[in-house]
Structures are given as structure tokens and as C-alpha cells.
Amino acid sequence: DGSHYMGFHSDDEVENGPSKDNRVIASVTFGEGRRFVFKRKSDGTKVELTLAPGSLLLMKGRTQSIWKHAVPKTSKPMGKRLNLTYRVLL
């Protein structure tokens, strides 16, 4: 439902790869679509998109170095959602 959320963060842990500029994270959404927000670390600029059912989001290159990302809470009634996240752990 809309009360489930993920706060702003970057997946920039060393376990996700030795180079911060070469990490790749793939995220697949099933069920209800949700709002997804990127926030630039340097100035707080936000970019929003909707993760539609069946969508694939790739975060690669310098994404984790430059941006934080979140799935915010919403008061709007939402159906169930499942997100699968893939990453290489070293």
C-alpha cells in the first residue's frame, strides 16, 4: 500500500562494486505502479517518474555518485506491488 516506502538513499556501498562509477543496479516492478524520485546530492534538484507495472529501471554509471533515490509514501490508495532488485555483490 502507499504507506510502504523507501527513503532517499544511494546504493554506493563498496559491496556493489569497487568503482562508484561502474555499479549497475536493475529494478523490476510488478503489480501497482509507484512514484520514484531521484534527488541530486549537490543541489537537491528532483526528477520524478512512475515505475509502471513490468517496468525495468537501470541505475548505472555515475547514478549512485550523483543522485539519491526514493519511493515516497502516498496517501492515495494503492494496490500491491512487488519490486525485484538485482545487483552484483563483490
Image (cartoon, helix red, strand yellow):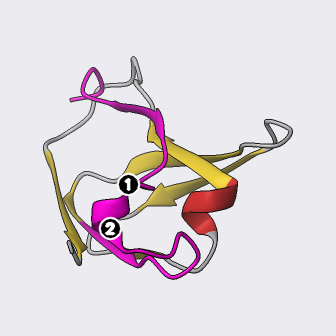
Which residue ends up furthest to the right in the rendered image?
A: 43
- Amino acid carrying mark 1 in the image: Glu
Helix, strand or loop status at disc 1: loop
| Badge 2 density bin: few <14, some 14–19, many ≥20, Cα 10 Å | some
Quarter assignment of residue 86: bottom left
Query: What residue did someone put label 1 on?
Result: 13
**Mark 2 lies on residue:** 16
CA separation in Å, label 2 and label 1: 6 Å
Question: Residue drawn 20% across and 29% down?
Answer: 1
Q: Give, as a three-letter code, the residue at label 2.
A: Asn
Please indicate whether residue 61 sits to the left or right of residue 73 in the image: right
- Decide whether the magenta segment is chiefly helix, strand or loop: loop
Residue in the foreground of this view, choosing between 88 and 76: 88
User: Seen in the image, is 13 located left or right of residue 47?
Assistant: left
Q: Position of residue 19 (x, y in %)?
A: 50, 76
Q: What is the span of residues highlighted in magenta in the rendered image?
A: 1-28
Please report contact status of discs 2 and 1: CB closer than 8 Å, yes or no.
Answer: yes
| Residue drawn at the location 32% of the way across and 67% of the way down | 16
Is residue 30 rendered magenta in the image?
no
Residue 26 picture location, percent across and down: 33, 75
62 sits to left or right of 29: right
Q: Quadrant of the C terminus?
A: bottom left
